Image (cartoon, rainbow, N blue to C red):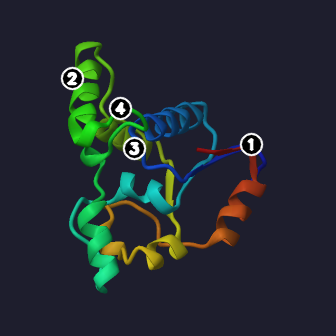
């Protein structure tokens, strides 16, 4: 493993930040860099199927109130209870901006490795089956740090 890769740690589940992370990952992978994305806490929303999650009372409540799925992700500002998400999607469509789901698929097609954080998934009671196909097995911070060690860039979003 050479030290020319890119590791992106995605902690945010906000539309604009997820879009930036996928765009950077696509750019790095297109340049031939080994590219890893470590999805932690709210960032996991970008790789969830969008089904309800959780087993305990709090886990089910979080799964209901903060259901993941790429189409449910709202902007970091001006979300307005989902109206902002709809507005941004319309504006992106009008300006021929690639939708998030398509960016995610492109990143996967280019070989970007999607690494879900085991601790975050345990805390939020999300199972690997709740994630989209093609996501690596859950891993911890040690795996992420090992990947970062072999990267020229490590970005935290």
Q: Is residue 1 left or right of residue 86?
A: right
The Cα–Cα distance between marks 1 and 2, rounded to whole angstroms, is 37 Å
Residue 37 percent across, percent down from the top left: 55, 52
**Mark earlier in primary sequence (4, 1):** 1
Disc on res. 125? none
Seen at 52% across and 74% down, the residue is 118
Q: How many neighbours does mark 4 have within 10 angstroms: few (below 14), some (14-19), or many (20 or more)? A: few
Q: Residue furthest front?
A: 80
Q: Nearer the viewer, mark 3 or mark 4?
A: 4
Q: Secondary structure at mark 2?
A: helix
The Cα–Cα distance between marks 3 and 1, rounded to whole angstroms, is 20 Å
Residue 52 percent across, percent down from the top left: 22, 69
Read off the residue under disc 1. 4
Read off the residue under disc 4. 78
Read off the residue under disc 3. 109
The Cα–Cα distance between marks 2 and 3, rounded to whole angstroms, is 26 Å
Q: Secondary structure at mark 4?
A: loop
Q: How many neighbours does mark 2 have within 10 angstroms: few (below 14), some (14-19), or many (20 or more)? A: few
Residue situated in front as seen by the camera: 127 or 109: 127
């Amino acid at each position: 493993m050479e030290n020319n890769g890119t590791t992106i740690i995605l902690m945010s589940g906000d539309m604009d930040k997820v879009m930036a992370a996928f765009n950077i990952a696509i750019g790095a992978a297109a340049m031939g860099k080994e590219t890893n994305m470590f999805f932690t806490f709210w960032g996991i929303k970008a790789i969830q199927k969008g089904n309800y999650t959780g087993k305990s009372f709090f886990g089910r409540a979080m799964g209901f109130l903060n259901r993941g799925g790429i189409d449910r992700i709202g902007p970091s500002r001006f979300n307005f209870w989902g109206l902002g998400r709809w507005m941004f999607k319309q504006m992106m469509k009008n300006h021929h901006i690639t939708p998030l789901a398509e960016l995610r698929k492109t990143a996967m097609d280019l070989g970007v490795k999607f690494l879900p954080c085991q601790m975050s998934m345990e805390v939020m009671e999300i199972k690997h089956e709740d994630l989209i196909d093609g996501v690596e097995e859950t891993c911890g911070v040690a795996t992420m740090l090992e990947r970062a060690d072999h990267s020229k860039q490590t970005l935290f979003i």
